[in-house]
Each structure stands twice: as structure tokens, then as C-alpha cells.
Image (tube, rainbow, N blue to C red):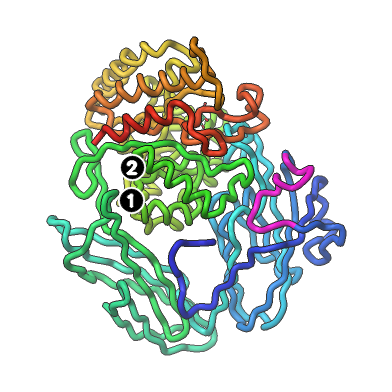
Amino acid sequence: MVRLFQRHIKRKVSLLDGIWRFKTDPENKGKDEQWYKNFPSDSMEIVVPSCWNHEFDLYDYEGWAWYATTFTTTERNINLMFHGVTGQAEIFLDGDYIGSHYGGFTGFEFLIKDVNPGKHTLVVFVDNTLDDMNTIPLARVDWFHYGGIIRSVELMELKTAWIKDYKISYQLNASFNEAALTLYVTLEGMNEEEISDQLNIYIDDELIKTVPVTISGEVKLQINNIVLKNIKLWDPQRPNLYNIQFELHKDDVIERIGFREIKVENGKILLNNKEIKLKGVNRHEDHPDWGFAMPLKLMKRDMTIIKDLGCNAIRGSHYPNSEVFLDLCDQEGILFWEEIPLWGYPDKVLGNKVILDRGLQMHREMIKRDYHHPSIIIWGLHNEIDTRVQDAYDLTKSFVEKIRAIDNSRLLTYATMFPLEDICLSFVDIVSINQYIGWYGEELDEWPEFLEKVKEKLRNEGLSHMPIIMSEFGAGAIYGDSTFEGPKWTENYQEKYLDYTLKLFKDEPSIVGTYIWQYCDIRTSKEMCLSRPRSFNNKGLVNEYRKPKMAYWTVRKLYREME
Ligand code: GCU
């Protein structure tokens, strides 16, 4: 499963998902021994997509591993699209190195021209090692280091001219009933010959533009000011979507968009010029039996539960989500905050140029991949890095400049754990605060004083125009543990904690959104497991098998009462 709508009618696309050959490479000797040419005969079967951690004896394997499969093509030009491989990937076709990719949660593709029609061998080298200096994320994170080809692999067979890339941007008019589209389309063909073709553009099957084209190598087009009248807006109550199809004689691609505008004004978030309050949860893409590689049914189940809670928002903590889940958010009218896994970086690492470069690349890939999802209203720059220091200031400034240049249609923020000493807030649109007063320290009744200090800091720094989101707050509860005394780790304490905090935040005018930490219990990393009973982060409103705790019903009542 790649998307929830048909992406191609003419283009021949097949999923390479299924049973592949697999072998771990703990000594990292596979390259020297050229496993990519002669795959080891003592390899095992594995399902793609999946996390290798669910295979016997591989539960906590981290490191290097090799995958192999074969496929047959009838065309000379193919595009291999990998939707998610954890860590670093190197791709080999018929024994030849094709290319590599860094980053575990965004896809990548390799276009290969002039292959011989027939059977081919595809080998993938995966490295999901994490360290404390150069990787994103670092090894010390509060989620499990699942590894593998965690999302689908697609084979696209292309004719002599195809649609290589596109971007659909639009401006709404003042009355929000018209959209002026600007389309950026890149076409590609064989280098040596000129192809006369015709680019047809449809919106919901209605032909709106035809452009005669001559294609040789790569051709970039910009089509301005296609005006659509009487549009139906996208919003949580009416998530109207439109299919845009780009079509050549022998190729096509379909994208799905929604018309909406998001902005901040006078300390509020406005969606289509109407003030909204975000009623959210933080959701990891995690399930004990599937890891990151969740099937559609589980994603749909999560969406059903989250909507039952009365939520209108989800933060995809802490990495780019499956495109399938983002399609669900588009269809269900859920407002989404998406971010890259730049989690908890201390000062000593933030000055490392590798982290800046890799972070920028991940942001670029996330925005490129997910630009057209109307549900995404916020790009999160990072989570709980040390935003008290100059290196964080420089990194945040660089991220904001580069991201705004690619996409100035969404709000930018980051989750800070140092709101009172933070020196980076002026770069973003929203102040998003992670705070666990009453859990990791202090007492619950110290929250009001903390909020006053935050507002005083923002006033003193001329930032009191910024809306505030409580991006993380919560308490751990072991599912099924309920006592009269209600100490920490009981469901009683978690219910009391969330009842108190949600009521407090609801009545605070400068707070425009709350994202409870967290939707469901998740496995944590071996680096953090001693501080986490069961080696799980137990702050879920539901446990890892999506069974509701006591707090679920309190949150459901409060979120449903809020407008
Ligand atoms: C942090 C972090 C989360 C983590 C949570 C917790 O704020 O962002 O990823 O799981 O706190 O401590 O439970």
C-alpha cells in the first residue's frame, strides 16, 4: 500500500512488496565479499515491508543487513521508488551500484534508463546504526530502533517520455471561493531523440489545460494562473479533495490536493480566516507486532480512535509519517504537524555540520514528498534540542530560511523544553512547549506559575503576539493499574494529571492548541529502557494494543466539550 488514491492510470506500476531474501551483516563484510553480486545462499526469507526486529533472534539487532529480490520489466526505462528504508540504504541492480540514500522516514527513487527488458536482480544494503554525533536521530531516543525496508518498494516502467516531477501551488482569493493555480511540471525523455507530445491537465477528470511539448532530456514547464471558481474548501468538518492529473501520450500521474489557508494572526491560528483551537495527541507510528511498518488497517483503527477522542489534530512525533497515514488525515480532516527526527540534540552535537546538512536534506525531502497534503499545517523543525545555545540558534535560523524558501504556505515551529531560556523563538510562528510539571518533577499546582513566567518572558522579548501550543504534557500509567491512592504510574494519576492540565490550558487565552503526550504506549530504545517500565513509554491514553486507560474517557469528554 502506497497511497489511498490511484496515482497512475497509464503508467505501468507494480509493487515489489512480498518475500525477499535477507541476511544480517554484523561484521559489515558484505561489500568486501560482494554480496550484491552473489547473494549469500544461507540467507533467509523476510517480508517487505516489515521491521527485521520481528524475526526470531533479531529483536534488538541494529546494524547492517542485506535484502535481495528479482523482478521482470518489459520497458527500457524504469524508476525504482523506495518509500522507507531505515537509516542508510545502498541500492544495487544486477550487481551494479545505483545509488544511496540517508534518512529513514522519507522515500527516494532511482531512474534507470536503457535497461534490458527481462529479469533483474535488486539488492538493498541497509544500515540502521545510530550514534551520538552524526546520525539523525541519535542513538538515545525515546522510541525503538526498528530496522529494515519498512515501507513499500515500487517498480515504475516508463515509455519514451514521462512526467518526472510536479508541484501544484495556489493562491485563494479574498472571499475564499476561487483558487489561482501555478503548476510546475518537469518532463523527461530519451536524451538522443526529440519527442513531440502533449501535456493534458485535468482537475477531477475535467480537462483544464493542454500544452504542446517537445521533449528531449529534461523539460521544465511553469503554467501560471489557472483559475478555479466556486471551489470547495478543505477543513476538518468538510475535507474536500481534488484530483489533479498530468497526462502525456504514454504516461500520467495523479496528485490529490485540498484548498485551504493557514496563518497566525494576533496570537491565534486561522484556518481559512477562521480561528481554530488544536485538540491533539502525539502519535508514534508504532505497534508491538509491526513496529514502524504498520498496515492500513492499524492506521485506520488509530484514526478512528483519535477521532473518537474528539481530536482535530495529530503531531507525527517524531519523524515523517507513512504517506498512507497522511492520506488518511487528508480524508478525515485531521490537522497534522510533521517533523524530522532531530530529537534531543545537546550543544556539543548541534555545531556538527553533518547534522545541519542532514537535517536540511531531511526537511527538503519531507516537504518535497508531502507538500500537497492539505492536512499538514505545521512543519516542526526539531524536538527538544538545546535551544539555549548559539549553535541551536544558527541551525534554527538556517532551517527556517531554507524551509520558507521551499514552502511559505505553512506554519513553522519546534518543540522546546527550555521555554524560559529559549533564544530561537523569534524565528518561528508558534511557541510550542514540552513540559512535564507534575510528572518528572515539581507538583501539578506549579503549572499556573510556570505559564505566567512563559507569558512574562514572551512579553519581555516582544514575542507576546505569538500563539502558544502545549506540544507535550502527560503522565505515565501502567495499563490496568488502578488503586485508591493513585500514585504515579497508576491510571488514576494519569487521569488526574490530564484532567487538571487540559482544564487549565483550555482557559488560558494564549494557548491555542494542546497535544497530549501521548496517543499510545510505545516501545522505547535500549538506551532509555531502564527509566521506562516494561521498556515502554507508558504515557499513552491507550496501551500499545490500543486498549483505553482511565484517562482516555476524561480526555474524550473534555476534547468533545471544547469547540
Ligand atoms: C519528551 C520527548 C518525547 C518523550 C517524552 C517522555 O518530551 O519529546 O519523545 O517520549 O518527553 O519523556 O515521555
What's the residue type where badge 1 is placed? Answer: Gly
Which residue is drawn at the image coordinates 45% and 75% (left, top)? 163
The question of residue 52 being in magenta is answered with yes
Q: Quadrant of residue 467?
A: top left
> Which quadrant would the C terminus be assigned to in this image?
top left
In the image: residue 520, left or right of residue 169: right
Relative to 182, 22 lies left or right: right
**Residue in the foreground of this view, choosing between 438 and 337:** 438
In percent of the image, x 31 and y 72: which residue is there? 204
- Which residue, given by chain and number where applicable, does mark 1 sit on? 333
Residue 126 lies, in percent from the top left, at 69, 53
Determine the image quadrant of residue 167.
Answer: bottom left
- Mark 1 or mark 2: name the one nearer the start of the chain: 2
Q: How many C-alpha atoms fall within 10 Å of the one at disc 2: few (<14), some, or many (≥20)?
A: many
Q: CA distance from mark 1 to mark 2?
A: 7 Å
For residue 477, side relative to residue 172 (left or right)? right
**Residue 424 in view of the camera:** no
* Residue 10 counted in the magenta span: no
- For the residues bearing labels 1 and 2, Cβ distance under 8 angstroms: yes
Q: Is residue 176 above or below residue 271?
A: below
Quarter of the image with the N terminus is bottom right
